[in-house]
């Protein structure tokens, strides 16, 4: 491998097998070439049930599904990026499979994964992968291929509790108003109940809660539970 490629290699995309607690285990897969793009998908689930006799619905938010993302990796066995050292494509595929889909003896299942490329860091599991062989030598052996893989995000134990705590209605929240924001809607986002908007207006001494000024910071205090 040439010096320039060796310097860049630590910054290439990595797929690291992990246990359920987020501790690395096994050999990571290091991409020879970084992906040209990473596609991240977010899906929200809504209840679109229509009342009898109604033509349309007012969708009610149900939940947000875990994010998924997909990427394409190029494998090369010609030595073009390794200073003439030819690493068989079949061996590179095995390394990818070993890190992502092989059953880990300790877990009795494929490993959890950490995918890292620059500032993109995602704890996840692999959903599917496919290998397309795009070039062969005179003996019919593959010398170039592409791996297409899709993953689903997962929250490591403990991190989910922290995130839930930060969004808890039992904590004070501060929200900077954006153009066209409505107080009842902001109140619903914080408390999951818009009926508190008058109390929020009183706390923030709003003279006209129907017309919020963009750039204003609103305080949403903790909710006292009724006993």
Image (cartoon, rainbow, N blue to C red):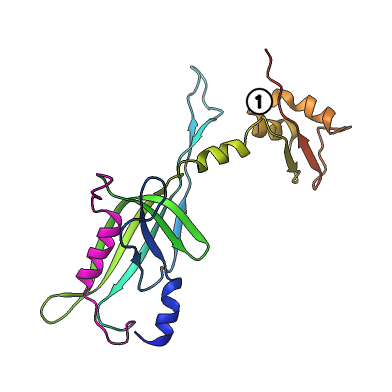
Query: Please, is residue 134 above or below residue 199 in the view?
Result: below
Of residue 131 and residue 120, the one placed in the foreground of this image is 120
User: In terms of image quadrants, where is residue 188?
Assistant: top right
Task: Judge from the rendering whether residue 40 lies leftward or rightward of residue 184; answer left or right.
Answer: left
Which x, y percent locates residue 186? 70, 35
Residue extent of the magenta highlight: 81-108
How packed mark 1 is, by other alpha carbons closer than 10 Å (few <14, some 14-19, many 20 or more), is few
Location of residue 167 with respect to 128 vertically, above or below: above
Quadrant in which the N terminus appears: bottom left
Query: How far across and down, in percent of the image, does residue 151 sit?
Result: 37, 52
The location of residue 140, given as percent across then percent down, is 12, 76
Quadrant for the C terminus in the image: top right
Q: Which residue is drawn at 12% across and 82% down?
A: 138
* Side of 63 relative to 199 (left or right): left
Q: In which quarter of the image is residue 199?
A: top right
**x and y percentages locating residue 137 in the rendered image:** 16, 80
Looking at the image, which residue is at 28% across and 45% down?
Answer: 107
**Residue sitting farthest toward the top:** 227
Q: How many marks?
A: 1
In the picture of the structure, the residue carrying the numbered disc 1 is 193
Between 167 and 147, the residue placed more toward the observer is 167
| Residue at disc 1, secondary structure | loop
Q: Residue at x 25, y 69 (%)?
A: 92
Residue at the spot x=38%, y=45% of the render? 20
């Amino acid at each position: 491998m040439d010096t320039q490629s060796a310097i860049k290699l630590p910054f290439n995309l990595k797929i690291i097998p992990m246990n359920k607690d987020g501790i690395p285990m096994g050999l990571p897969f290091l991409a020879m070439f970084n992906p040209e793009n990473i596609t991240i998908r977010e899906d929200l689930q809504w209840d679109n049930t229509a009342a009898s006799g109604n033509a349309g619905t007012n969708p009610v938010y149900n939940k947000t599904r875990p994010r998924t993302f997909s990427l394409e990796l190029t494998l090369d066995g010609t030595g073009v990026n390794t200073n003439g050292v030819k690493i068989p494509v079949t061996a590179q595929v095995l390394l990818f499979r070993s890190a992502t889909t092989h059953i880990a003896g300790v877990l009795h299942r494929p490993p959890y994964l950490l995918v890292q490329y620059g500032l993109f860091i995602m704890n996840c599991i692999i959903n599917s992968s496919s290998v397309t062989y795009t070039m062969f030598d005179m003996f019919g052996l593959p010398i170039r291929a592409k791996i297409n893989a899709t993953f689903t995000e997962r929250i490591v134990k403990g991190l989910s509790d922290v995130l839930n705590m930060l969004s808890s209605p039992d904590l004070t929240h501060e929200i900077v108003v954006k153009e066209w924001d409505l107080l009842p809607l902001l109140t619903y986002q914080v408390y999951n109940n818009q009926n508190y908007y008058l109390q929020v207006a009183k706390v923030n001494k709003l003279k006209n809660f129907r017309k919020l000024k963009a750039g204003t910071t609103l305080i949403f205090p903790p909710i006292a539970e009724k006993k």
